[in-house]
Amino acid sequence: MRFAWGLGLGVLLAVTACTTEGGDDGKRPPSPRAEATHYWTAAPCSLFRGKTLLKGYTVFYALDIADPATQLDYGTSDGKQWPYQHAACTMHLSDHQQRIWDLDAAVDIYERTGPACSRHRVDKDLDAATASPDVIDDHAYRLSVGKGSRPGRTLQMCNGNARFIVTAQGPAGSRPADVQGTLDQLTDRGADVYESGLRNRHG
């Protein structure tokens, strides 16, 4: 199921938070939360409407990518096949200089607690073998990524029956050192909004 909304529909996410680009070192992890049960949604982008991300950043386009079909994960550490559902929201943001940033928030919702963090640990070990992830704790780590001339950062974390992968990409031609703090802030806030919106709710 796909649904796009943007300026043409008169819908904007005006994001107003107390941090700006370069405002801190970007190392603040997402707010710690108790383990919870999370529920799949067909409209993940709706969770971000009216939520704050960063001051001066406006979401002008968002696209839901949500498939209700159950898939099987073969990559957990116990070697079993665990069913899950996938949902994602892809957003384009502009800053005060009209530069374009991207934020992709994806989640895998498993039918039970356990496999999500098992898969998270497998991914962390694989990433550690080929890159240098910044480990926050047993349930979260960051990784530098890039697409062409656009630097990026990914935050992967698990909670209860959910595994979250939130990736932010900076403007084309920007230097990683100049935008890493902002990228980390965007992924932190995106993960916070996503996780809190999906916990203990149906639909």
Image (cartoon, rainbow, N blue to C red):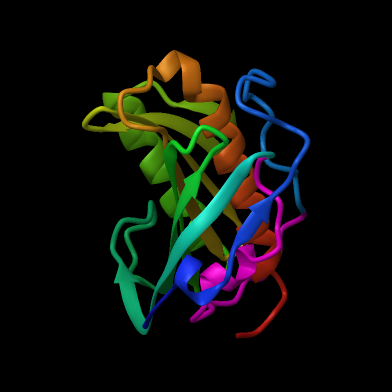
Residue at figure coordinates x 64%, y 18% from the top left: 25
Percent across and percent down for residue 111 are 51, 77
**Is residue 99 depicted above or below 201 in this figure?**
above
Q: Is residue 133 left or right of residue 27?
A: left
Percent across and percent down for residue 3 are 41, 78
Q: Is residue 33 among what the camera can see?
A: yes
Span shown in magenta:
34-54
Q: Is residue 111 among what the camera can see?
A: no
**Is residue 179 depicted above or below 18 in this figure?**
above
Q: Quadrant of residue 67?
A: bottom left
Q: How many marks?
A: 0
Principal secondary structure, stretch drawn in magenta:
loop
Percent across and percent down for residue 70 are 36, 82
Residue at figure coordinates x 47%, y 38% from the top left: 98
- Indicate the quadrant containing the C terminus: top left, top right, bottom left or bottom right: bottom right
Percent across and percent down for residue 110 are 49, 71
- Indicate the quadrant containing the N terminus: top left, top right, bottom left or bottom right: bottom left
Can residue 195 be found in the magenta stretch? no
**Is residue 96 depicted above or below 77 in this figure?**
above
Can residue 42 be found in the magenta stretch? yes
Q: Quick one: 46 or 167, which is closer to the camera?
A: 46
Residue situated furthest top in the rendering: 177
**Is residue 86 depicted above or below 103 in this figure?**
below
Residue situated furthest left in the rendering: 148
Q: Quadrant of residue 21?
A: top right
Q: Is residue 175 left or right of residue 116?
A: left
